[in-house]
Amino acid sequence: MMDKATREASRRAKMQARDDAGRFREERKRAKQQYKKIGAYPAKKINGQNIPYNSSGRVPAEMMAARLNQMNAEKGPLADLKRKAKKLIRRNPTPEEAAVWWEDPSCCDVEGIDDPNSDLFMTEDLRDPDSQKKIAVLAKTEKDQLKIRKDIESAFTSEQLKAMGCVTIVSTKDLGENAGATAFKTENRPSDMIYIDPECVNDKETVIHEAVHLSRLRDRSRGLLKRSVNKDRTGRTIEVTPVGRAAEEAATIIETKQRLKK
């Protein structure tokens, strides 16, 4: 008499596929599909490029700004903005529409991103426009963008701003209870990102605080005690312990207060 386990094994064997000779076919396990992410967004692979998209199926403007920064890291994206391309892709494109631009932003323009009318790099009214030529700002209004730029200009020297490299600053409501956040460049994030809640744009402290986090990581001229604990000796970004994160936050708060006095 077969016990319960034996009967179950026999049932499964009868259901298993066999070849023409009656032998059991090798079962193939279905691999789980891996979804690539760019920043916080899912991505679609087109022509070998992983292109992010939001819930509306469009490529997020901040990710295009970050990509523009990434592809123009040496000279800065302003050279691209000053040159009018023959082809213009409409604002808020789908991944399919943006694919050729994502691969090479110099081949065409995306409306509102790198066309001559783009407002991502409004640096004309700054004391030193060149110091922020690699900093893209996506804000609700031109007034907000200028406020953000003026605030970081007042707190950092031109050389310190240049040392931050390519940065994308985004005014967004998607921060939960946080007033701001900093996300460092990784394989899946085209450039360093600073996020600011729109309600905190005018307080000055929030953007300075997040910029200090970034400066502590990127500015190689800083002394050892003023460098981020999120970086190892080779300069790579690393994961740190809760104690390390607390130490980094404490150091950033102290430096932010000092810079606000300038």
Image (spheres, rainbow, N blue to C red):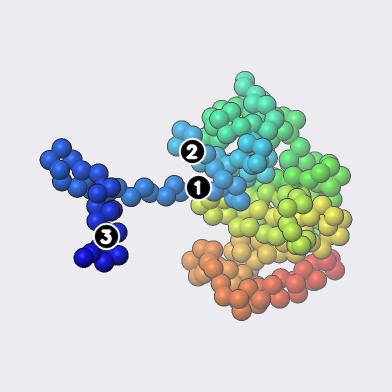
Residue 25's label in the rendered image is none
Location of residue 10 with respect to 239 vertically, above or below: above
Front one among 17 and 212: 17
CA separation in Å, label 3 and label 2:
46 Å
For label 2, the crowd category at 10 Å Cα-Cα, with few meaning under 14, some 14 to 19 and many 20 or more, is: some
For the point 55% across and 30% down, the residue is 96
Residue 98 point in image, percent of width and height: 58, 31
Taking the spot 66% from the left edge, 76% from the top edge, the residue there is 246
Disc 1, SS = loop
Q: What element carries label 3?
A: helix
**From the viewer's perspective, is residue 143 above or below residue 261?**
above
Q: Which disc is residue 36 wearing?
A: 1
Mark 1 residue type: Lys
Do the residues bearing badges 1 and 2 touch, measured as CB atoms within 8 Å?
yes
| 177 lies left or right of 242 | right
Q: Is mark 2 on a helix, strand or loop?
A: strand
Q: Which residue is drawn at 45% across and 48% down?
A: 34
Mark 3 highlights which residue?
Answer: 7
- Residue 45 - label: 2
Query: Residue 244: image x %, image y %?
Result: 60, 76
Image quadrant in which you'd find residue 100: top right
